[in-house]
Image (spheres, helix red, strand yellow):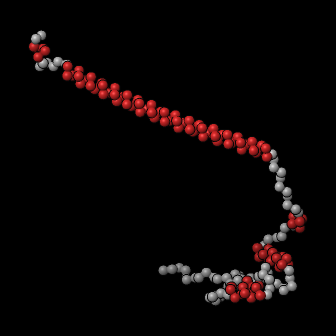
Amino acid sequence: MTYFPDVQPPTINLDISRSPLLLSGAFSHDVRDLSSPRVSSPRLPGLFFALPSPRPSASLQTRLQALARHQQQCIGLCPPPAAARNKPLPSLPPSAIPPRQIISVLELLERMDNDVVKEVQRVKEGIAEACVMVREYVEAEQVRSTKWKQQRDRERKDTKTVDDDFWLNA
């Protein structure tokens, strides 16, 4: 059970030939052919607005101004004050750091990078040396353990038990 009937989204038909940005004439005729909708849809009020149709003699600047006024009316924006529009953009601030200092910082960073690489290499060599020392210790410990086990077995073998012939002569 659906609560919403099958509602298809409205399609917006744009009449590009009436755009104030396009020049009137042959181009608008070509665009009209390309922009015609394949499926006709009912026009819904509120979704469409009429742009002011440009006059053939109007310049691009006046068309842009008309479009800007229309957008401001639709959106509800107020134009910026004339003083703000005519005010020149601020210039970029001069570089606070002279190029020589930048180069010296880059050289310092390069030296630090080389030092870090050398330190990493030294640490790797130290780790390899420690691994060799650990292997030598493990081998020495195995040899010592083997000798201790052999000595323990020999002592057990040489130790006289109660039933041994050694105790008969005593």
Q: Quadrant of the C terminus?
A: top left
Give how far across and how far down residue 164 sits, in percent.
12, 18
Residue 77 vs 142, above or below: the answer is: below
Quadrant of residue 65 within the rendered picture? bottom right
Give how far across and how far down residue 97 sits, in percent.
79, 46
Query: Would residue 75 be visible to someone looking at this image?
Result: yes
Give how far across and how far down residue 72 sits, in percent.
79, 74
Left or right of residue 54: residue 45: left
Q: Residue at x 56, y 35 (%)?
A: 122
Between 29 and 87, which is closer to the camera in this rendering? 29
Q: Residue at x 77, y 43 (%)?
A: 101
Left or right of residue 77: residue 88: right
Query: Would residue 66 be visible to someone looking at this image?
Result: no
Left or right of residue 92: residue 169: left
Q: Of all residues shown, which one is farthest toward the left? A: 168
Residue 87 vs 100, above or below: the answer is: below
Quadrant of residue 103 within the rendered picture? top right
Q: Residue at x 48, y 36 (%)?
A: 128
